[in-house]
Image (cartoon, grey):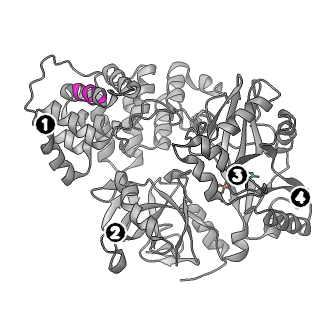
Amino acid sequence: MLYSDIARVFGRLEETGSRLEMTSILAEFFAKLEPSELRDVIYLSQGRLHPEFYPIELGMADKLVLKAIAKAAGYPEEEAERIWQKEGDPGAVAEDMISRKRQLTLFSETLTLENVVQGLTEIERSEGKDSQSQKMKILSRMLSNAEPEGAKYLCRIVTGRMRTGASAMTILDALAECFADKSDRPEIERAFNVTCDMGLVGETLARGGLAAVSSIQVTVDNPIKVMLAERLPSLPEVMARMGGRCAMEFKYDGMRIQAHISNGSSRLYSRRLENLTGNFPDIGEHLAQSLKVKEAIIEGECVAVDPDTGAMLPFQTVTHRRRKHGMDSAVKEIPVKLFMFDILYLDGEDMTQMPYCERRRVLSQTFAEDPLLTLTTMEVVSSDEEAEAFFDRAIASKCEGVMAKSISDASVYRAGSRGFLWIKYKKDYHEALTDTFDLTVVGAFYGMGKRAGKYGALLMASPDSETGKFCTVCKLGTGFDDAFLDALPGMLERFKSESCPRSVEAKMIPDVWFEPGMVLEVVGAEISVSPIHTAAWGWVKEDAGIGIRFPRYTGRLRDDKGPEASTSVQEIFDMYEMQGSDAV
Ligand code: ATP
């Protein structure tokens, strides 16, 4: 397969904003590929070489890529820098400079998919003192053999800016359209939810059809998409929804970890599939040592504890474990505990389809006693009073609230979905009108006065799970401290976009646009109808959306969440309705 044919398809995807059109472009193209080629094309379309949870990223610095472009095109580096200053995207620099290449390629060869995969693999593997110059040379060699459009996407892939607009959901649609029937889409999505590996699902489907996909099961070392909770505004409503009786667990305020344990070691993943094994070596070791069976996948909330008193510390403390350096001292300075709440796999058996009570029973028997590992505090409650008393205990123990979990036989682990089998109820609901929102930054406004020269406010958006578009919900200008304001431009630099990204729907126009990437936790006074925000446009009122009034940043950067996992338009709409308000 010629790489230029693949790049052309990426170009067509980028041109159209329509998910339907992207689906048919991809479906038509998928039909032309060998199963193993399909796997690689799926990864490349997402700007990677492997599934999302793979621990190594290509991540080349922009400056290094500019060097490679200049070398391949036969121009001085300054020329690449000049265009980059204007465009802000190394892909655009490559497309421009390769189209007016001055350098004659001596041993020119037509770039194939295989060459690209091989070249990118070499880049990924280069290590040691000389690795930067090695990476630059490999990329430059590929660029000199590429056509302008292909060069653009190569540079976008190595800098982590692929952005063709084709999301995982669109790829699933295309796979169903190409190899199965529309009605088979849920089964294909199920396979993706239990493996987080779209390439694997695509190749399996192309080789063995739907029957092969149906046999894809939960396995150790393929992270499973996490199950999420719905929210309700009061405990009596939670109890009524649960049929008057349910399990209640403390809702710990830490970091969710999915642990895959086998052969005496553990791999730990965050809810956005980052590999956290190196950040929590103590938890990994204790899980492996205390496991009483051969293999298991469990989930728990990792919480920092006070080294002297053992009391639970706020969420921010555990995030310090994310730093890359000084892990040995961090392990000593910030002791953590894992509060385990679910088991998804045990010795060859997929546990996700078993009811909650059975999973909890198995989990309680799977580990030997261990100072770092414990089960979440749980009680079965049968009345509003019992629920209130349990909630008070949770708050007194420094938890953020409770998780109600259905104890019916239908209470399976729904990978990748948010539903009422789990309902969260937090302290914030008691105190404020609404819950916190996790919102995605899509724009920034330059500051004035004390904030001159920095960003003074941010345009925040939520994903609409139906359309996949990010719709704006508020302009956020409070809750920032000076250190955060100083750091913001640097943190947002890699998401900068020349114009409004295709995935964003906005009426308010910021000074700078960003591709959805950074997620911040925000509190608001209320949700009201808004003529300038595009979330839930027309749902409450014609020619209006809904927006969050008086938003304030809580200081919590949700780098454990990807933009697609931020609070959705549908959730904000539900909260609007829950307010019981007709605030206009
Ligand atoms: P939030 O921002 O409120 O933590 P979320 O969007 O991260 O919510 P939800 O499904 O809404 O995720 O809430 C569940 C989260 O609560 C889980 O992702 C997990 O990190 C955390 N958690 C804490 N204690 C528990 C528990 N006992 N059972 C399940 N999840 C728990």
Question: Is any atom of residue 396 visible in this view?
Answer: yes
The tag earlier along the polypeptide, 1 or 2, is 1
The residue indicated by pointer 3 is 303
Label ID, residue 29 = none
How many residues crowd around disc 4 within 10 Å: few (fewer than 14), some, or many (20 or more)? many
User: Which of the pair 278/563 is nearer the observer?
Assistant: 278
Kind of residue at badge 3: Val
**Closer to us: mark 4 or mark 1?**
1
The residue nearer to you, when weighing 230 against 401, is 401
Read off the residue under disc 2: 454
Which of pointers 2 and 3 lies earlier in the amino acid sequence? Answer: 3
Q: Secondary structure at mark 1?
A: helix
Q: Residue at x 63, y 56 (%)?
A: 317
The residue that disc 1 covers is 99
Magenta residues, start to end = 135-141
Of circles 1 and 2, which is in front?
A: 2
Looking at the rendered structure, which numbered label has been put on residue 245?
Answer: 4
Does dot 4 land on a helix, a strand or a loop?
Answer: loop
Say which residue appears at 82% left-offset and 59% top-offset.
242
Q: CA distance from mark 1 to mark 3?
A: 53 Å
**Label 1 packing within 10 angstroms: few (<14), some (14-19), many (20+):** some
x, y (%) of residue 496? 33, 55
Marks 1 & 2, CB-CB < 8 Å contact = no
Whole-angstrom CA distance, mark 4 to mark 1, is: 67 Å
Q: CA distance from mark 2 to mark 3?
A: 34 Å
In three-dimensional space, the C-alpha distance between marks 4 and 3, rounded to whole angstroms, equals 28 Å
User: Where the N terminus falls, by quadrant?
Assistant: top left
